[in-house]
């Protein structure tokens, strides 16, 4: 077995990919397809598509606690318990609080999924492209550093990953949210359509579109070839999908990579650090702690792709110390771990609508409803805060019954629920400004069970986020009012950064090695055979859900790396 | 195989969910395994009557048929705080001391506003009922695999 090979030669590969989540799966697929013998290291356990989805076909009554988690589990896991998807049907895919503790100078909810496939099993599957309104943001508005790429650099790679992953969406013709290679969109329901008209008539330039999502609304041959079939509208995605109806590493990229015969997948392999050779002046491999035996094993490769997940990638680079890089691999600029940002999800709004009484929905919508692309400060600065927010919007009609009685009356009432008013809701997804002081650092005194220093978070909202949040509530209240929605209830409950699960940055891309870690190819400026294509690479956060962009970066970066390898530049 | 082993090997189905039987039943304990609360056989029977009065058997199964009292116990045992558990156990004890007219209990509670004990039992029993295999398969059908989405479905089409 290659996994436990003894000689250095047997532990040598053409490429190593650290992490098997949404970006690592793509790195693995691309490297393997290009013929490189690739070792994929995953710190968590094996999760094989379908076989390891234990709850996927369970009915509600088959769950011991009807999908509620026991009191003690909730009490022992205050952090992960705040995640909307952490329930009895999915708890086995989440990292529990005590598994990998971390410090919080300020509260940060670090939500992790350590297993083969990572959080690609659990994600919300929203896939909106970035545009130049996003890539030009830092330059135009004077924050962070200029992105070293523009939309044109990424466009062919968005096309490429969308065709393979399968993205449902409409061609909406919006420059702020470029169209792509879409499968048919999921329709807006009657109330969502009505809200779209209200908004587009009265609140220009705001738009309401069908949310684009990584679901096979109508699979093509390339998806069938992956063993995936049409999404069956179960909306039980967090359990893992037996149909491969949504995109995950497990259903898509990893089996594809395996089929080439070039992939060696090694679960239970915690990468402690990247090994740097002072003579060769490049990385030569990684030091792994076997999670089961706690043995230390080195693996070697010509190129290394870091896809551990934004924050875990920061931890790994910070912990990769050499005399050349005493403060973390590639950290000449002293920006590693800094300028970490996220999405401001700290406001939502709820209401009801009494129109369209003759309609309801039938079946379930995996896209979740509508998406409102950013419209604030889009063409020029116009508000008293920087950047803007996107928003989700959805309408649902539920049946409910009067439960005030008892006995036969209660029973009859329960079995004859009535269709109520439509419930409508929206949540904000705000761009936050990366700042030097929003950072993660290594705890010099405490180590985890793998001998890796604990990470400490010092990340917070700022005044810009507060202003944006107020504006979101004002605007949505106006839109809801105009639409005739009633019982409008803004919800501005604070939530810790991180709970958005859109943490980004810390090893940002940039033109200048003095102010950034990665170049325009996601390549570490001063250690060119190491590439970072997960969330850690992000120079700014935009408002779009970021996973699709990580996929595009991964495919693009592998293409470049392999060309460089062939030219013997690495 | 002696009777105790036979009982232990039998699985109890509560609302469609399989519970592990306890071996304490014959010694006056609950019939299912509980880890954080102690419920006597007597209290369990009383709870069964109490939830049966809430959701009685008609031409369709009632609370006892669906073992909803066991579901309530299981949820209180695993999913509630020690404070809630105290409310639950005290409520059962008080009921045991009072006269056992369960319809009168629900009538009084309904008229005067539900006590914490009644609220807990009622909410969990309704949850167990609505999510029971019987209701989800025969009354208000739960579809595991809808395979469709229509955002403009006319209600007249089904209700007439």
Image (spheres, grey):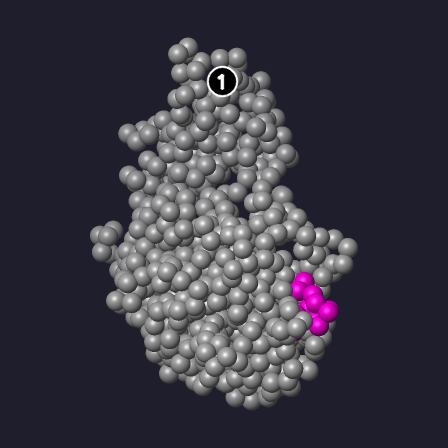
Q: Which residues are magenta?
A: A319-330
Q: Position of residue A452 (x, y in %)?
A: 67, 55
Relative side of B59 to B124, left or right = left
Relative side of A359 to A517, left or right = left
Front-most of residues B10 and A527? A527
Q: Which residue is mark 1?
A: B23
Q: Position of residue A434 (x, y in %)?
A: 64, 75
Q: Which picture quadrant has residue A271?
A: bottom right
Front-most of residues A124 and A453? A453
Front-most of residues A14 and A360? A14
**Compared with residue A308, is residue A516 higher up or lower down, i.e. above or below?**
below
Q: Which residue appears at 70% of the width and 77% of the height?
A: A332
Q: Position of residue B146 (x, y in %)?
A: 29, 53
Helix, strand or loop status at disc 1: loop
Taking the magenta stretch, the answer to whether it contains residue A515 is: no
Which chain does tag 1 point to? B
Question: Overall secondary structure of the magenta stretch?
Answer: loop
Q: Which residue appears at 71% of the width and 53% of the height?
A: A447
């Amino acid at each position: 077995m290659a996994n436990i090979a003894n000689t250095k030669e047997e532990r040598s590969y053409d490429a190593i990919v650290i992490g098997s989540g949404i970006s690592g799966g793509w790195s693995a697929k691309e490297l393997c397809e290009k013929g490189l013998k690739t070792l994929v290291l995953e710190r968590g356990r094996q999760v094989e598509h379908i076989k390891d989805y234990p709850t996927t076909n369970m009915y509600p009554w088959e769950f011991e606690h009807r999908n509620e988690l026991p009191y003690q589990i909730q009490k022992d896991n205050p952090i992960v318990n705040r995640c909307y998807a952490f329930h009895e049907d999915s708890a086995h895919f989440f990292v529990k609080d005590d598994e990998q503790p971390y410090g919080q100078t300020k509260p940060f909810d670090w939500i992790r999924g350590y297993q083969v496939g990572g959080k690609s099993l659990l994600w919300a599957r929203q896939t909106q492209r970035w545009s130049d309104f996003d890539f030009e943001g830092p330059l135009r508005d004077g924050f962070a550093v200029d992105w070293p790429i523009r939309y044109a650099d990424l466009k062919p790679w968005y096309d490429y990953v969308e065709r393979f992953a399968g993205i449902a969406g409409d061609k909406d013709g919006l420059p702020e949210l470029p169209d792509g290679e879409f499968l048919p969109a999921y329709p807006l329901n009657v109330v969502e359509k009505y809200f779209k008209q209200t908004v587009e008539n009265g609140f220009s330039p705001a738009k309401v579109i069908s949310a684009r999502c990584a679901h096979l609304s109508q699979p093509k041959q390339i998806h069938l070839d992956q063993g995936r079939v049409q999404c069956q509208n179960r909306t039980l995605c967090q359990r893992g999908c037996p149909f491969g109806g949504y995109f995950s590493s497990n259903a898509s990229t990893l089996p594809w990579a395996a089929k080439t015969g070039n992939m060696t997948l090694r679960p239970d392999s915690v990468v402690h650090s990247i090994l740097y050779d002072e003579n060769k002046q490049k990385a030569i491999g990684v030091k792994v702690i076997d999670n089961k035996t706690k043995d230390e094993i080195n693996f070697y490769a010509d190129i290394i792709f870091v896809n551990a997940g934004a924050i875990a990638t920061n931890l790994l680079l910070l912990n990769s110390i050499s005399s050349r890089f005493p403060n973390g691999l590639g950290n000449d600029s002293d920006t590693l771990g800094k300028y970490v940002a996220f999405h401001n999800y700290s406001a939502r709004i709820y209401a009801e609508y009494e129109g369209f009484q003759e309609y309801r929905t039938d079946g379930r919508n995996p896209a979740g409803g509508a998406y409102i692309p950013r419209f604030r400060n889009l063409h020029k600065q116009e508000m008293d805060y920087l950047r803007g927010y996107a928003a989700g919007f959805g309408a649902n009609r539920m049946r409910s019954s009067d439960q005030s009685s008892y006995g036969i009356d209660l029973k009859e009432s329960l079995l004859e629920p009535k269709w109520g008013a439509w419930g409508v809701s929206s949540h904000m997804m705000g761009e936050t400004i990366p700042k030097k002081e929003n950072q993660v650092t290594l705890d010099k005194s405490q180590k985890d069970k793998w001998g890796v220093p604990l990470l400490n978070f010092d990340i917070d909202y700022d005044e810009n986020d507060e202003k944006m949040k107020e504006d979101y509530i004002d605007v949505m209240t106006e839109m809801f009012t105009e639409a005739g929605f009633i019982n409008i209830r803004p919800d501005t409950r604070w939530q810790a950064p991180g709970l958005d699960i859109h943490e980004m940055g810390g090893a940002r891309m940039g033109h200048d090695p003095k102010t950034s870690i990665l170049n325009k190819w996601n390549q570490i400026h001063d250690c060119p055979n190491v590439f970072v294509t997960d969330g850690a690479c992000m120079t700014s956060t935009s408002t779009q859900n970021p996973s699709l962009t990580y996929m595009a970066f991964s495919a693009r970066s592998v293409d470049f790396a392999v060309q460089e390898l062939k030219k013997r530049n690495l | 195989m002696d009777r105790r082993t036979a009982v232990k090997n039998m699985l109890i189905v509560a609302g469609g969910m399989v519970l592990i039987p306890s071996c304490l039943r014959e010694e006056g304990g609950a019939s299912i395994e509980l880890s954080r609360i102690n419920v006597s056989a007597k209290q369990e029977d009383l709870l069964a009557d109490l939830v049966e009065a809430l959701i009685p058997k008609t031409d369709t199964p009632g609370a006892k048929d669906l073992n909803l009292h066991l579901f309530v116990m299981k949820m209180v045992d695993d999913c509630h705080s020690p404070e809630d558990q105290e409310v639950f156990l005290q409520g059962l004890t008080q009921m045991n001391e009072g006269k056992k007219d369960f319809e009168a209990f629900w009538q009084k509670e309904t008229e005067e506003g539900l006590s914490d004990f009644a609220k807990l039992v009622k909410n969990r029993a309704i949850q167990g009922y609505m999510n029971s295999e019987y209701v989800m398969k025969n009354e208000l059908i739960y579809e595991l695999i809808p395979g469709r989405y229509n955002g403009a479905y006319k209600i007249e089409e089904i209700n007439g």
